[in-house]
Amino acid sequence: MRVILRPGTPEDAEACGVICFEAFKSIAAEHNFAGAFPSAEVATGLMMRALAHPGIYSVVAESDGKVLGSNFLDERNPIAGIGPITIDPAVQNQTIGRQLMFDVLARGAQRGVAGVRLVQSAYNNRSLCLYTKLGFETRELLSRLNGDPLGIRFVGYEVRPAVKADISVCNALCQRVHGYHRGRELEDAVDQGSARVVEHLGEITAYATDLSFTGHAVAESNQSLKALIGAASVFPRCGFLVPTRNGELFRWCLQHGLRLVHQMTLMTIGLYNEPAGAYLPSVLY
């Protein structure tokens, strides 16, 4: 089978969405977990947004005009995020995934990004081994949580929608905690209306692009993260991610009825600093 790689286009969304849905469903079922998406239509919507976004690089693998898989590199920030990478289950284990990974890593090197990162399901031994062979270091064990909204408010910690005037302060907070900012990602979230900030004693002490699988949050303390989680009106089907070693926050979430779905792994190449504050990663990093 002769496989070619080419840039993705919005016209690939349906084919890539079906493959994304089936690929995640297949590997999850092998380990008795539910798939990441409730339907192929939901996965297709994700593919459409990624393929159409000017800040996200996409690559598609095809053979004889048939799409076999895809991969993405989110280039909006100084650190690039890889994924989702998905291959048609019928043609897995034929080096297509390796080729797609080589492509986005070469793209990151060409653009001179400070680092690239990804998050993989800890039960997926094949992807863990592939990424390790490609040079990724395992940095953090993550717990994917889900459940009903908590409806908790904390006196002195006001949670409100973020506005454009908050972005510079939020970027500075992210810079202090992680050593880089995620400003363009935050700008998109403000435009979409999903971003939130926490104000405590007149200062912004936390922000979130969304309390979801695709959103991230950064905070000065666990208390500010608890305020964000407690105020969330809904947790989408995929839930959100918490660093497992943050025992205080993980324990608090479990004590308030949130449930563990499964564990995931944050992996990195290039720049990495141990976080100097509290945070919730996205499915990218």
Image: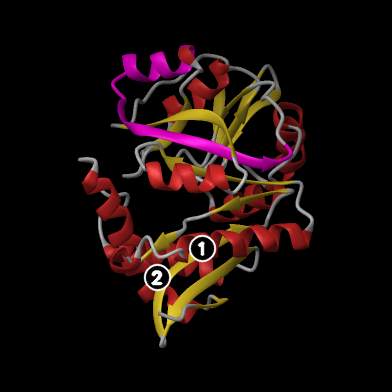
* Residue at x 60% of width, y 55% of height: 191
Say which residue label 1 marks: 71
- Residue 251 is one of the magenta-drawn residues: yes
- Is 45 in front, or is 178? 178
Q: Quadrant of residue 143?
A: top left
Please say if 199 is above or below 223.
Answer: below
| Highlighted magenta segment, given as a residue range | 248-271
x%, y% of residue 184? 69, 52
Q: CA distance from mark 2 to mark 1?
A: 9 Å
Q: The disc labelled 2 sits on which kind of residue?
A: Cys
Please say if 4 is above or below 263.
Answer: below
Element marked by disc 1: strand
Say which residue label 2 marks: 16
Q: Quadrant of residue 108?
A: bottom right
- Is 284 in front, or is 55? 284
x%, y% of residue 28? 27, 46
Residue 34 visible in this rendered orientation of the protein: no
- Is 278 in front, or is 87? 87
Identity of the residue furthest to the bottom in this view: 64
Sequence-earlier tag: 2 or 1: 2
